[in-house]
Image (tube, helix red, strand yellow):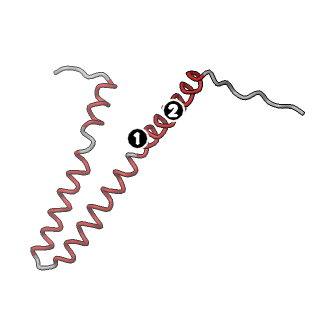
Amino acid sequence: MRGLSCTAFARRAASMLHLVPLTWLFVVTLMAAAEGLGGHWLGALVTWLLYGALPAGLLGWLLAAPLRRRARRARERAELDEANRRDHATGEALAPVREE
């Protein structure tokens, strides 16, 4: 058995984290199917939505917040770098402050 460092273990665990919501959706789908086989299709739909789709969507949205924040910061940093590069390329400096 090979040993894993802490970072390698964390990386592997993070890469497999998507399995938890997928298995939960599978379980909820089976619950809804069991309810639907009893003839209550509206109850099956409500079960699947309230126990499956809405919580999984909320969990995905909350867990993706750091990724969205990181992407927004990278976009802002790229825009700032582009503006700085454009100013330096044209040789324009900040306008001197005019005192009266």
Please tell me which residue is depicted at 51% across the width and 32% down the height of the picture.
Answer: 77
Inspect the image, locate mark 2, and give the three-letter code of the amino acid beneath it: Arg
Q: In which quadrant will I find the C terminus?
A: top right
Q: Residue 67 got which mark?
A: 1
The residue mark sitting in front, 2 or 1, is 2
Residue 40 against residue 68 in the figure, above or below: below
Task: Determine the image quadrant of residue 38.
Answer: bottom left
Please tell me which residue is depicted at 21% across the width and 57% down the height of the picture.
Answer: 25
Tag 2, which secondary structure? helix
Q: In which quadrant will I find the N terminus?
A: top left
Inspect the image, locate mark 1, and give the three-letter code of the amino acid beneath it: Leu
Q: Which residue ends up furthest to the left in the rendered image?
A: 37
Q: Gap between marks 2 and 1, in whole Å? A: 15 Å
Tag 2 residue = 77
Give how far across and how far down residue 12 sits, in percent: 26, 31
Question: Is 63 positioned to the left or the right of 84 in the image?
Answer: left
Tag 1, which secondary structure? helix
Give how far across and how far down residue 39 sits, in percent: 11, 79
Task: Determine the image quadrant of residue 45.
Answer: bottom left
Q: Earlier in the sequence, mark 2 or mark 1?
A: 1
